[in-house]
């Protein structure tokens, strides 16, 4: 198993930051995960060689209606300058899905959180006033002016249906 193999995996969040594609200028927030287990026969099996992957959420005006509910579900603090999410992602980890798609003859590998999967129905859409506050915060960060502080939000629900694999609390198992 490696980062190019489609399937269900489990990893711990090791970094969050914002960036921008050089070619298009499109801003995004990325999450770096240390992947250590994969799902097999309804249980977690340790990977022989753990690996790191990134998941991204775009912060363009077109993407915000999809991105903001995902950030909200992760317990995002609303501060794009110093992004943080619910501690369960760094302390316990989360289920990650790797898929493969082909477009114009090119194969693409996509990584997403299981809880980001869309089944055609919004589970708990954000209220318009909260979306307005998040939009103002994003635009303020992008322009460098202060924005209103969003109201506190509850933490995200527990991830996945398969129990989390045992992960040591030390950083000794990280390859860096």
Image: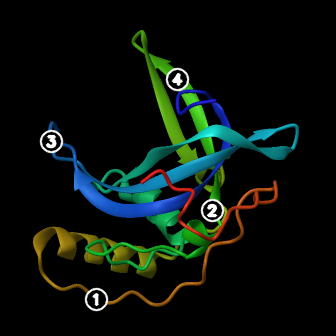
Cα separation between marks 3 and 4: 24 Å
The residue lying at 81 percent from left, 56 percent from top is: 161
Disc 1: which residue: 148
Quickly name the residue at label 2. Answer: 93
- Residue 118 in view, yes or no: no
Q: CA distance from mark 3 to mark 2?
A: 30 Å
Q: Closer to us: mark 4 or mark 2?
A: 2
Residue at image coords 31%, 57%:
59
| First reached walking from the N terminus: tag 3 or tag 4 | 3
Residue 173, position in %: x, y? 57, 56
User: Would you identify the image quadrant in which residue 164 lies?
Assistant: bottom right
Task: Give the percent coordinates (x, y) of residue 27.
Answer: 24, 53
Between circles 4 and 1, the one closer to the viewer is 4
Question: Looking at the image, which is closer to me, 33 or 6?
Answer: 33
- Name the residue at 20% across, 73% down: 141
* Element class at badge 4: strand
Q: How is the image coloured?
A: rainbow
What whole-number distance in Å separates the C-alpha atoms at marks 1 and 3? 29 Å
Residue pointed to by mark 3: 22
Residue 159's label in the rendered image is none
**Residue 102 visible somewhere in the drawing:** yes
Q: Are marks 4 and 1 in contact (CB under 8 Å)?
A: no
Residue 73 percent across, percent down from the top left? 57, 68
Which callout, 1 or 3, points to the residue nearer the camera? 3
Q: Residues within 10 Å of mark 3 (few under 14, many from 20)?
A: few
Mark 1 surroundings within 10 Å by alpha-carbon count, few (fewer than 14), some (14 through 19), many (20 or more) = few
Query: Which residue position holds label 4?
Result: 101
Q: Measuring 53% from the left and 27% from the top, which residue is drawn there?
A: 4
């Amino acid at each position: 198993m490696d980062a190019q193999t489609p399937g269900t995996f489990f990893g711990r969040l090791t970094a969050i930051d914002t960036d921008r594609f050089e070619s298009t200028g499109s801003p995004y927030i990325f999450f770096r995960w240390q992947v250590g287990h994969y799902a097999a026969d309804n249980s977690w099996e340790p990977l022989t060689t753990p690996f790191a992957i990134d998941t991204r959420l775009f912060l363009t005006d077109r993407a915000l209606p999809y991105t903001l509910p995902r950030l909200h579900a992760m317990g995002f603090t609303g501060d794009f300058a110093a992004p943080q999410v619910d501690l369960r992602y760094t302390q316990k980890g989360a289920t990650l899905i790797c898929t493969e798609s082909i477009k114009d003859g090119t194969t693409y590998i996509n990584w997403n959180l299981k809880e980001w999967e869309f089944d055609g129905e919004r589970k708990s859409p954000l209220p318009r006033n909260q979306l307005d506050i998040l939009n103002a915060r994003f635009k303020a960060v992008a322009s460098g002016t202060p924005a209103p502080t969003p109201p506190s939000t509850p933490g995200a629900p527990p991830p996945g249906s398969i129990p989390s694999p045992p992960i040591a609390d030390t950083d000794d198992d990280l390859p860096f």
